[in-house]
Image (cartoon, rainbow, N blue to C red):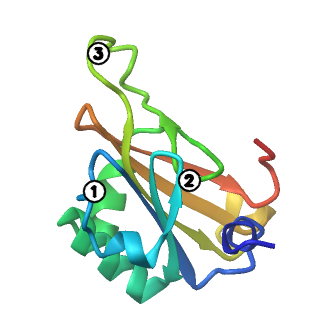
């Protein structure tokens, strides 16, 4: 099982996933040597603290501050955490709507909180689009096969 599969199965709750598109990442970026090359970019799966630092180094933003701003709009982020469908594409169809980067973490099941959290571990994913907008998507581990 790959690190990504383990993360998506809720087995790496202390880790974060950070994806950066080739268009956003310099060719000589150190992130390329730390992460795994995937179609269109680089994906890193790192312990939480290291991942948040890598996110800040790669984007110039704090990970949790970015997540808070992205929560304002719900979109769809691919289960593979390297693509998405920008919810602003209909409003601005002339703009490009490609994912620049994604930040994701998983939170353990918490029945006291209720809602999704009572159903199981929850993946929180946040994406930034080439149009300049950010959006979020969350789901219960095991509920997405796509």
In this view, the mark in front (1 or 2): 1
Question: In the picture, residue 140 is in which quadrant?
Answer: bottom right
Q: Quadrant of the C terminus?
A: top right
Q: Around disc 1, counting alpha carbons within 10 Å, would you say few (fewer than 14), some (14 to 19), or many (20 or more)? A: some
Q: Mark 1 or 3 closer to N-term?
A: 1
User: Between residues 132 and 114, which one lies in front from this camera angle?
Assistant: 132
| 132 versus 62 height, above or below | above
Structural crowding at the residue carrying mark 2, measured as other residues with C-alpha within 10 Å and reported as few (<14), some (14–19) or many (≥20) = many
Badge 1 or badge 2: first in the primary sequence: 1
How far apart marks 3 and 2 lie (CA) works out to 23 Å
The nearer-to-camera label among 3 and 2 is 2
Quick check: can you spot residue 75? Answer: no
Residue 9 is left or right of residue 104, and the answer is right
The tag on residue 94 is none
Alpha carbon of mark 1 to alpha carbon of mark 2: how far?
16 Å
Q: Under tag 3, what secondary structure?
A: loop
Q: Are marks 1 and 2 in contact (CB under 8 Å)?
A: no
Q: In the picture provided, is 34 more to the left or to the right than 12? A: left
Q: Position of residue 34 (x, y in %)?
A: 43, 78
Between residue 131 and residue 71, name the one nearer to us. Answer: 131
Q: Which residue is mark 2?
A: 81
The residue under label 3 is 92
Residue 67 point in image, percent of width and height: 36, 60
Q: Secondary structure at mark 1?
A: loop
The residue depicted at 26 percent of the width and 19 percent of the height is: 95
Counting from the top left corner in percent of width and height, residue 39 is at 53, 47
The residue positioned 61% from the left and 73% from the top of the image is 107
Residue 25 disc label: 1
Q: Which residue reaches farthest front?
A: 28
Is residue 46 shown left or right of residue 78?
left
Q: Answer with mark 3 or mark 2, whichever residue precedes in sequence.
A: 2
The CA distance from mark 1 to mark 3 is 25 Å
């Amino acid at each position: 099982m790959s690190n990504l599969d383990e993360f998506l199965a809720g087995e790496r709750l202390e880790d974060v996933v950070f994806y950066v598109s080739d268009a956003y990442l310099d060719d000589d970026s150190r992130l390329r040597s730390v992460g795994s090359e995937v179609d269109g970019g680089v994906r890193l799966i790192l312990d939480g603290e290291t991942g948040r630092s890598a996110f800040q180094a790669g984007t110039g933003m704090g990970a949790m501050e970015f997540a808070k701003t992205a929560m304002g709009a719900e979109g769809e982020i691919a289960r593979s955490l390297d693509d998405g469908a920008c919810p602003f594409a209909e409003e601005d169809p002339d703009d490009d709507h490609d994912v620049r980067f994604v930040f994701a973490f998983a939170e353990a099941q918490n029945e006291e909180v209720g809602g999704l959290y009572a159903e199981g571990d929850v993946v929180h994913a946040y994406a930034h689009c080439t149009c300049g907008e950010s959006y979020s998507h969350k789901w219960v581990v095991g509920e997405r096969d796509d």
